[in-house]
């Protein structure tokens, strides 16, 4: 979904080259009808649309579907991105972006879908696999290469949040609200410290970088293939 | 016809108003000689006419006196409801000034200019209310009877035996832009009174016998007509002559001042009231203040001279200020003082060219007014009197006893009487120094002679003395008295000199100190200190800013003292605000809002009516301020106001400079950008053009080079846009948002956004194990790191190393270091590195090294906006290192 024809064409060419199936909608109404007919696996959405506000579309889509949504926007302000992410978008791209970046984001988002399909038999409430990371929800333990890692309750909470929303960019606001509760609303520093220590503990092998930082926005759990 | 003419006149006034841009309202007085001549009636008639013409006319206050005609005339005019107040079981109706100011009509009618307001009102007198209305730009119509004029009080008292309590200063009368005399024959007035058209029936009889006698009415009418004709004469005021009236501290001086004011008005000339300061203990000082106030109210300029010889001082002043006539009071003096103090004779000798008018001061005139003043001040006098008297007597007796004892010793040693005489004379002089007042001196002299007689002349211990001592006694008394009076005089002069020096010095130091100050708070502190030297009371300063008052600056007397909050409570600040708006003094000791706890004075800038600040003097015990002190205080405040204004001008100038600088920067930036955009854009469009048209003619390798160029130039443009965005971000935000950010994350993020070509370099990051957190806007710092690293990529050959490290420098700072092993910079390059548009000197020879030079200057702005510093140095062997510091985030989390 993109209203600028030039950028739309660039994206189309890229997608075609990478052999993705795609449909292109030019406004909000068309987006909805195409979502119904085409049933895509991923939605690329421009926040600035002629008819409906992009954030409203996200909200509407999220009511019925878990389909990954990647925002493409020329808006520079962090608040716009945060607003879209909090409304349910998975990731964002700011113009000007490189084609490489676009494809990387698409891959990340689709990996979640494939993870969910792969692990359909694994009850989502019980285990989470990512690279050499394993979360055993029932026992509340975290294993790296089958070695238990000791986490503080907050670190565990944050890790679970990221894992359950793997590939999604979670805003600082969202993480703080979910892991600390409303009263810690603006204490960004504790979140930073928690992420830093958490990262040290789970990225100790140096093979996988699970948690990606989005400066001024939030954090994202990158999904890797399950190793062994 | 008539009303039309008036309207035209009004329109003319309104036009004049617009032209000058002056917003002050116009005052019109309907002037009559007694109640019932029809002033209110005429005023209402005119109001109705104006309303018809479409003016916004409102009735502020009309004294109805139960006259139905008045009620009818008010008719459909809008009436501001009166304020009612309970005062000692009487319900007082008062004009509601605040409601009127809020309503802000074009014209307001307020009856009875001379009215005295109820004690709870803001102003003591209604004419002050009216002045405030005029200040607010509202035109005021009011009424006034001639007997209320201050300058006519002596005539009224002397000839008609009328004592009028409600008085209006003449300057208020002179404020009138229009004056309309309402006149009817006295007989007709009496007829109207008898018919009950003026007062209620029960009052008619009393009025007829007391005030409304034909004699009184004729005299009052004459006064009113005279006043009116005088005003017509002086309508075009051109001062040709200058009168000088000598004011003394005697109560009869008031009479002289009034006469002088009348004369001055009749001759339409300026009046100067001169007082020669000479502490005359015979008069209580308060008479003097009363007289000076009176002179001020009658429109005279007050001048205070210092010196022993009044005649010389006055003569000199008169010569300097080109006085044409001198008005003096003269009263029969006691024979002793006549020669010495005869000002008239002395001035006659000193100033033969100036005319002198002698006004007889009524010595025995015990008019009601004088009695009142006497009563008012008798109490005050008595209080201080008792204490001083007792102290003085004790001193005199103590001195005499000591004298006698010393004399006794001397007498036993050598029997020389002459020494004893000298010791007593010395004692008398000591008394003169220690005790105030001549009468004590004379007493001490006589007592000394008696003691000498009693103790040291034969027969001893008796007042009898041989005839050979008579001359000794006489001479001794004479010498004692003369030396006593001279000592007194010298002492007085010394005191007055000291005071004068002190005061002049106070003013001078203020000026000197204020000239070297640069801050408003300093000006206020200096002014307060100097003011307290003159008038030692706690002072509260309010500075004006954008038409409002700032928080009070408090100056208690000692450093340990504090000022109670009640002196700058909301009500007190409201008074200060009133002073600010009206540019007039208010509060305690004045007639405006006299119930306040402080005395408020406005501080003017060089343009009048522009109040820069308000000063409040905390006067708990209603102390009086001497007129001279007052003038000095006002002088200091003037200097202070000028200092404020100077600062304001400086500030405006500085702001204009900054603005001009910003403008210049903006144009430079625009020019720079458009110039620098051209190269990459030409490159991109050119390459694409070639690829589009001649793709078959160029080899695959050449194609790839072209693609590469396009990609690099586009990346360069993107980075430029990022920098520009960061720059606007920095400029548009007054308060940069800051939050705790991990250094680790900042550097990682930055490395993800490097320009193409960075992969040709080896970039190494080394961070300590400790979690480094900085209090910044992460995006801006990321941009700083990107710029510095990109810079290093650009200016170092491929394959060079770039090292990034950060560490905690101290409790409050984190230092970043980004170094490379590329070529070094020259000294001018190092110093100019962070300047806008500086791109180094070798730019010309390396095509790839073009750049706006905004990158590093942006870095500097960003780092400095967080309170950090940025600098660069050549490393020892090769390479350059960039350093910058950022505020470390307070480690409250780690402590937990």
Image (cartoon, rainbow, N blue to C red):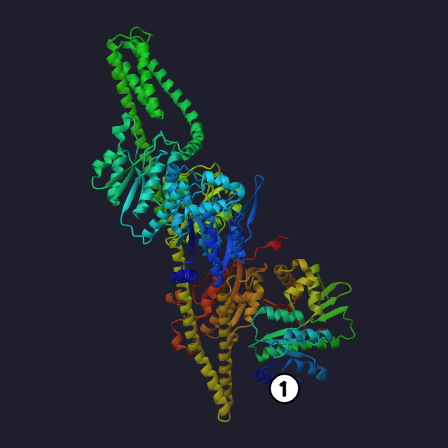
Is residue B107 visible to the viewer in this orientation of the structure?
Answer: no
x and y percent of residue B235 in the render? Answer: 33, 53
**What chain does badge 1 belong to?**
A
Image point (58%, 39%), residue name: B89
Drawn side of residue A223 relative to residue B351, left or right:
right
Q: Secondary structure at mark 1?
A: helix
x and y percent of residue B551 in the render? Answer: 50, 50
x and y percent of residue B186 in the render? Answer: 42, 46
Q: Quadrant of residue B381?
A: top left
Residue toward you, B521 or B793: B521
Drawn side of residue B677 relative to residue B336, left or right:
right
Does residue B287 sit above or below B631 in this rendering? above
* Residue labelled with disc 1: A16
Image point (45%, 30%), residue name: B379
Residue toward you, A74 or A199: A74
Figure quadrant of the N terminus of chain B: bottom left
x and y percent of residue B894 in the render? Answer: 61, 55
- How would you rate the neighbour count of disc 1 (Cα within 10 Å): few for under 14, some for 14-19, many for 20 or more? few
């Amino acid at each position: 979904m993109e209203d600028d024809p030039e950028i739309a064409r660039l994206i189309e060419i890229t997608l075609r080259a990478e052999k993705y199936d795609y449909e292109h909608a030019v406004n909000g109404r068309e987006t909805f009808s195409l979502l119904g007919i085409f049933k895509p696996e991923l939605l690329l959405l421009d926040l600035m649309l002629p008819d409906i506000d992009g954030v409203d579309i996200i909200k509407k889509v999220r009511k019925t579907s878990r389909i990954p949504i990647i925002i493409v926007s020329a808006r520079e302000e962090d608040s716009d991105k945060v607003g879209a992410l909090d409304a349910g978008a998975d990731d964002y791209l700011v113009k000007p972006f490189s084609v490489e970046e676009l494809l990387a984001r698409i891959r990340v988002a689709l990996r979640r879908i494939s993870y969910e399909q792969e692990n359909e038999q694994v009850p989502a409430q019980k285990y989470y696999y990512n690279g050499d990371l394993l979360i055993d929800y029932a026992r509340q333990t975290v294993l790296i290469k089958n070695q238990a890692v000791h986490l503080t309750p907050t670190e565990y909470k944050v890790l679970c949040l990221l894992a359950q929303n793997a590939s999604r960019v979670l805003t600082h606001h969202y993480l703080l609200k979910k892991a600390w509760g409303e009263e810690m609303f603006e204490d960004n520093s504790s979140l930073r410290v928690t992420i830093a220590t958490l990262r040290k503990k789970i990225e100790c092998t140096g093979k996988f970088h699970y948690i990606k930082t989005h400066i001024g926005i939030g954090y994202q759990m990158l999904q890797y293939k399950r190793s062994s | 016809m008539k009303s039309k003419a008036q309207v035209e006149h009004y329109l003319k006034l309104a036009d004049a108003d617009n032209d000058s841009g002056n917003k002050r309202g116009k005052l019109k007085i309907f002037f009559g000689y007694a109640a019932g001549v029809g002033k209110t009636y005429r005023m209402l008639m005119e109001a109705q006419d104006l309303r018809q013409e479409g003016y916004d006319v409102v009735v502020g206050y009309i004294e109805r006196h139960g006259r139905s005609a008045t009620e009818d005339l008010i008719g459909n005019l809008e009436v501001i409801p009166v304020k009612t107040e309970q005062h000692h079981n009487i319900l007082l109706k008062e004009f509601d000034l605040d409601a009127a100011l809020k309503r802000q009509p074009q014209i307001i009618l307020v009856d009875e200019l001379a009215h005295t307001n109820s004690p709870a009102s803001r102003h003591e007198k209604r004419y002050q209310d009216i002045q405030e209305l005029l200040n607010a730009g509202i035109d005021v119509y009011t009424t006034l009877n001639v007997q209320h004029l201050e300058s006519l009080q002596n005539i009224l008292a002397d000839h008609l035996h009328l004592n009028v309590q409600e008085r209006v200063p003449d300057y208020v009368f002179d404020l009138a832009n229009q004056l309309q005399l309402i006149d009817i024959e006295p007989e007709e007035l009496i007829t109207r009174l008898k018919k009950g058209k003026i007062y209620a029936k029960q009052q008619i009889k009393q009025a007829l016998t007391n005030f409304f006698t034909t004699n009184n009415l004729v005299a009052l009418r004459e006064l009113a007509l005279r006043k009116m004709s005088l005003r017509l004469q002086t309508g075009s005021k051109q001062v040709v002559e200058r009168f000088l009236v000598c004011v003394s501290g005697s109560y009869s001086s008031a009479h002289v001042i009034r006469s002088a004011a009348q004369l001055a008005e009749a001759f339409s000339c300026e009046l100067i009231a001169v007082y020669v300061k000479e502490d005359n203990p015979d008069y209580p000082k308060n008479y003097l203040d009363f007289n000076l106030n009176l002179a001020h109210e009658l429109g005279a300029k007050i001048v205070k001279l210092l010196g022993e010889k009044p005649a010389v001082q006055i003569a000199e002043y008169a010569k300097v200020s080109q006085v044409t006539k001198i008005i003096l009071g003269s009263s029969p003096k006691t024979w002793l003082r006549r020669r010495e103090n005869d000002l008239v004779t002395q001035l006659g000798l000193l100033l033969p060219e100036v005319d002198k008018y002698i006004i007889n001061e009524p010595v025995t005139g015990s008019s009601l007014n004088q009695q009142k003043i006497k009563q008012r001040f008798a109490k005050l006098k008595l209080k201080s009197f008792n204490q001083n008297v007792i102290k003085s007597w004790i001193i005199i007796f103590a001195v005499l006893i000591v004298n006698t004892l010393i004399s006794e010793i001397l007498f036993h040693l050598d029997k020389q009487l002459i020494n004893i005489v000298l010791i007593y004379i010395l004692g008398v002089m000591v008394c003169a120094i220690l005790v105030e007042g001549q009468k004590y001196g004379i007493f001490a002299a006589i007592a000394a002679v008696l003691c000498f007689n009693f103790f040291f002349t034969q027969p001893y211990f008796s007042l009898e003395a041989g005839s050979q001592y008579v001359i000794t006694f006489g001479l001794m008394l004479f010498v004692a008295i003369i030396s006593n009076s001279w000592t007194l005089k010298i002492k007085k002069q010394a005191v007055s000199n000291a005071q004068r020096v002190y005061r002049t010095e106070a003013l001078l130091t203020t000026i000197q100190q204020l000239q070297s100050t640069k801050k408003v708070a300093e000006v206020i502190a200096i002014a307060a200190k100097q003011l307290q030297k003159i008038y030692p009371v706690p002072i509260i300063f309010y500075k004006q800013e954008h038409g409002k008052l700032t928080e009070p600056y408090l100056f208690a007397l000692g450093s340990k003292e504090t000022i109670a909050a009640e002196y700058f409570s909301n009500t007190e600040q409201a008074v200060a605000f009133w002073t600010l708006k009206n540019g007039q003094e208010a509060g305690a000791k004045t007639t405006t809002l006299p119930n306040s706890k402080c005395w408020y004075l406005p501080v003017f800038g060089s343009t009048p009516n522009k109040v820069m600040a308000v000063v409040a003097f905390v006067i708990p015990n209603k102390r009086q301020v001497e007129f001279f002190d007052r003038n000095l205080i006002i002088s200091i405040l003037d200097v202070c106001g000028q200092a404020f204004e100077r600062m304001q001008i400086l500030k405006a100038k500085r702001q204009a400079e900054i603005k001009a600088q910003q403008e210049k920067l903006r144009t430079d930036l625009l020019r720079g950008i458009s110039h620098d955009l051209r190269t990459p854009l030409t490159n991109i469009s050119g390459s694409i053009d070639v690829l589009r048209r001649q793709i078959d003619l160029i080899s695959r390798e050449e194609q790839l080079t072209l693609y590469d160029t396009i990609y690099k130039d586009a990346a360069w443009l993107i980075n430029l846009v990022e920098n520009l965005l960061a720059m606007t971000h920095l400029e548009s935000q007054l308060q940069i948002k800051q939050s705790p950010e991990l250094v680790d994350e900042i550097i990682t993020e930055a490395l993800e956004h490097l320009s193409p070509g960075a992969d040709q370099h080896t970039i190494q990051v080394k961070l300590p194990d400790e979690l480094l957190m900085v209090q910044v806007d992460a995006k801006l710092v990321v941009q700083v790191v990107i710029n510095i690293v990109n810079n290093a990529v650009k200016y170092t050959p491929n394959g060079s190393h770039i090292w990034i490290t950060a560490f905690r420098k101290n409790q409050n700072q984190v230092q970043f270091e980004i170094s490379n092993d590329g070529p070094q910079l020259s000294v001018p390059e190092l110093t100019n590195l962070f300047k806008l548009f500086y791109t180094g000197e070798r730019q010309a020879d390396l095509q790839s090294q073009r750049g706006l030079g905004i990158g590093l200057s942006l870095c500097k702005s960003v780092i400095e906006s967080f309170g950090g510093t940025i600098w660069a140095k050549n490393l020892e062997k090769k390479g350059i290192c960039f350093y910058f510091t950022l505020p470390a985030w307070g480690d409250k989390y780690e402590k937990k």
